[in-house]
Every structure is written in C-alpha cells, then in structure tokens.
Amino acid sequence: MNKKKILIFDDDKVILEVISIIFEEGGYEVEISETSHDIIQKVSQFRPDVILMDNWIPNIGGVEATKLLKSHADYKHIPVIYVTANNDIVSLAKSAQADDYVAKPFNLEDLEEKVAKYIKD
C-alpha cells in the first residue's frame, strides 16, 4: 500500500518536528520545507496528497506560494490547508485559494481530521 504524502511548509522548526512525528506515526510520508519559493519544484518531486501551508514563511509568503500552486495546471487539484496564527485566517486562506485552514495554535486532532478529510484512498 502506498503511504499518503504530506508536504509541510513552515519556518518554525518545532512545529515542523511535532507535525512530522504525529503524521509519520499515523502512517503518512512527510516532507518538510522552511521556504516556499520553490513550491512547484518541491511538489513535482514529492507529489504530495495534501499540503500544509504556513502564512509567515521566508522568501514568498504562504499566500503567494499557494496561488502559485493553484495556478499550475498539474498541481492545482492538490488540497492546501492553510495553517497560521493570523486573526484574519479566513480571508487569508480565501485570497490564497487554499482549500481549508487551521488556526494556530492548533489542536493536533483537528489538524489530523482536516488532513484525513482531504486524503481519499
């Protein structure tokens, strides 16, 4: 059986580590990135089933990176879950064309449920 893949963009190493462990224990294959300017390259190499995107990320922010992905014919179908500590997360996620969002600090169960919702067998 193929493992489901999650690509996580976040510049917070602690968050990356925690989320990686949780999802790897849940049977997912996880790849992490602290920058998002090369999102297309990362996605084409890793072929994730779902992407978790932080808003505050170096080089280009989460909104721009998500738009880049969503404007790409081959990858626009990949669900992006926006994860950020911004008060305006709803409109940010919308302007980024993200499929869903989770506010930080998040409950890990909520995050796992959101991911599971978008990963269909």
Image (cartoon, rainbow, N blue to C red):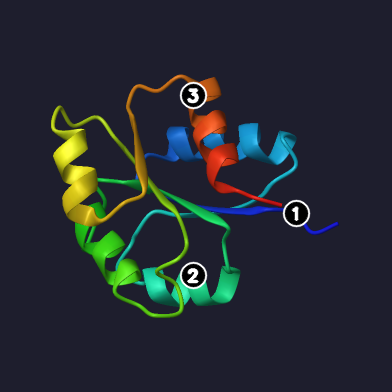
Q: CA distance from mark 3 to mark 1?
A: 21 Å
Report the residue marked by disc 1: 3
Quadrant where the N terminus lies?
bottom right
Q: Are marks 3 and 2 in contact (CB under 8 Å)?
A: no
Q: Position of residue 60 (x, y in %)?
A: 21, 62
Q: CA distance from mark 3 to mark 2?
A: 24 Å
Q: What is the crowding at mark 1: few (fewer than 14 residues within 10 Å), some, or many (at least 20)? A: few
Report the residue marked by disc 2: 43
Q: Secondary structure at mark 2?
A: helix
The image shows residue 103, relative to residue 72, as above or below, that is above
Q: Is residue 61 visible?
A: no
Q: For the residue marked with disc 3, what is the amino acid?
A: Asp
State which mark lies toward you, 3 or 2. Answer: 3
Mark 3 or 2 closer to N-term?
Answer: 2
The residue at the point 40 percent across, 69 percent down is: 76
Quarter of the image for residue 40 reads bottom left
Report the residue marked by disc 3: 110
Q: For the residue marked with disc 2, what is the amino acid?
A: Val
Q: Position of residue 19 (x, y in %)?
A: 54, 35
